[in-house]
Amino acid sequence: MTSDNIALLQLCSGKNTKNNLAQIEQQIKQLPHSVKLVLTPENALLFSDNISYRNLAESQGEGPLQGAITEMARHYQVWILVGSMPLISRKDPELITSSSLLFDDSGAIRARYDKIHMFDVNIIEDEQGIYNESSIYQRGEHITVVDTPVGRLGMTICYDLRFPCLFQVLRKQGADRIAVPAAFTRLTGEAHCGGHC
């Protein structure tokens, strides 16, 4: 879907990072040249288990996943927001964060946002039942607003949506657009859209 020079990619990411990257590139190839910013969902580069998240976490600016996105941004001359991926914590190299990275059209990282609100819930009707992101990820501490070719972008991830005060602060810091990359479960997705999805 595209609008105002922004493209939203829909993915079904899994454990195979090469396949995930190929899905992203295939969709970017098909976009009109007018698109300036491409947004991917939460867990766009890796959707897996806790061990894989820890093993494949990269340091900011290093690693094959970020390298592949850098090359895509350069090649297709487009800014790319990675909805989320596991990154080594800024504070403790033993911990990881669920982080969103914004790459500019030269492949440089312009911004990083570490998810602040962890999805720690028990959903009785759901197959998995218990979700406990704080057992995997360290909570983020920084609010992020960044200039892009399509305006000032506030960065959030999924469950942050439930905390309106974060969005109020993003607006106060000048965000005129806010990204909310998400990978909801079937039940939580229906709850967010009132069954009209």
Image (tube, grey):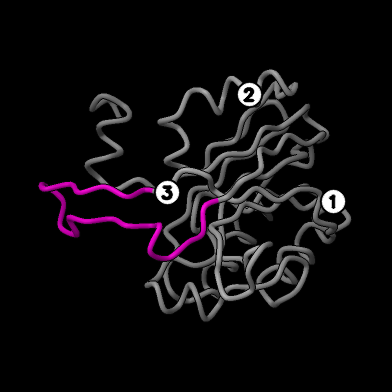
Q: What element carries label 3?
A: loop
> Which residue is disc 2 drawn over?
169
Residue shown at the point (47%, 76%) measured from the top left: 16
Report the front residue among 141 and 126: 141
Q: How far apart are marks 1 and 2 (CA)?
A: 27 Å
Quadrant in which the N terminus is drawn: top right
> Which residue is disc 1 drawn over?
105
Residue 73 found in image quarter: bottom right
Q: Which of marks 1 and 2 is nearer the N terminus?
A: 1
Residue shown at the point (64%, 74%) measured from the top left: 93
Residue shown at the point (75%, 73%) measured from the top left: 62
* Left or right, 89 with reference to 69: left
Q: Residue 186: percent from the left, percent from the top? A: 25, 45
Q: Residues within 10 Å of mark 2 (few under 14, many from 20)?
A: some
Q: Which of marks 1 and 2 is in front?
A: 2
Q: How far apart are marks 3 and 1 (CA)?
A: 30 Å
Q: Residue 95: percent from the left, percent from the top? A: 55, 70
Question: Label 2 is placed on what type of residue?
Answer: Val
> Which residue is disc 3 drawn over?
118
Determine whether label 3 and label 2 are within 8 Å by CB. Answer: no
Q: Earlier in the sequence, mark 3 or mark 1?
A: 1
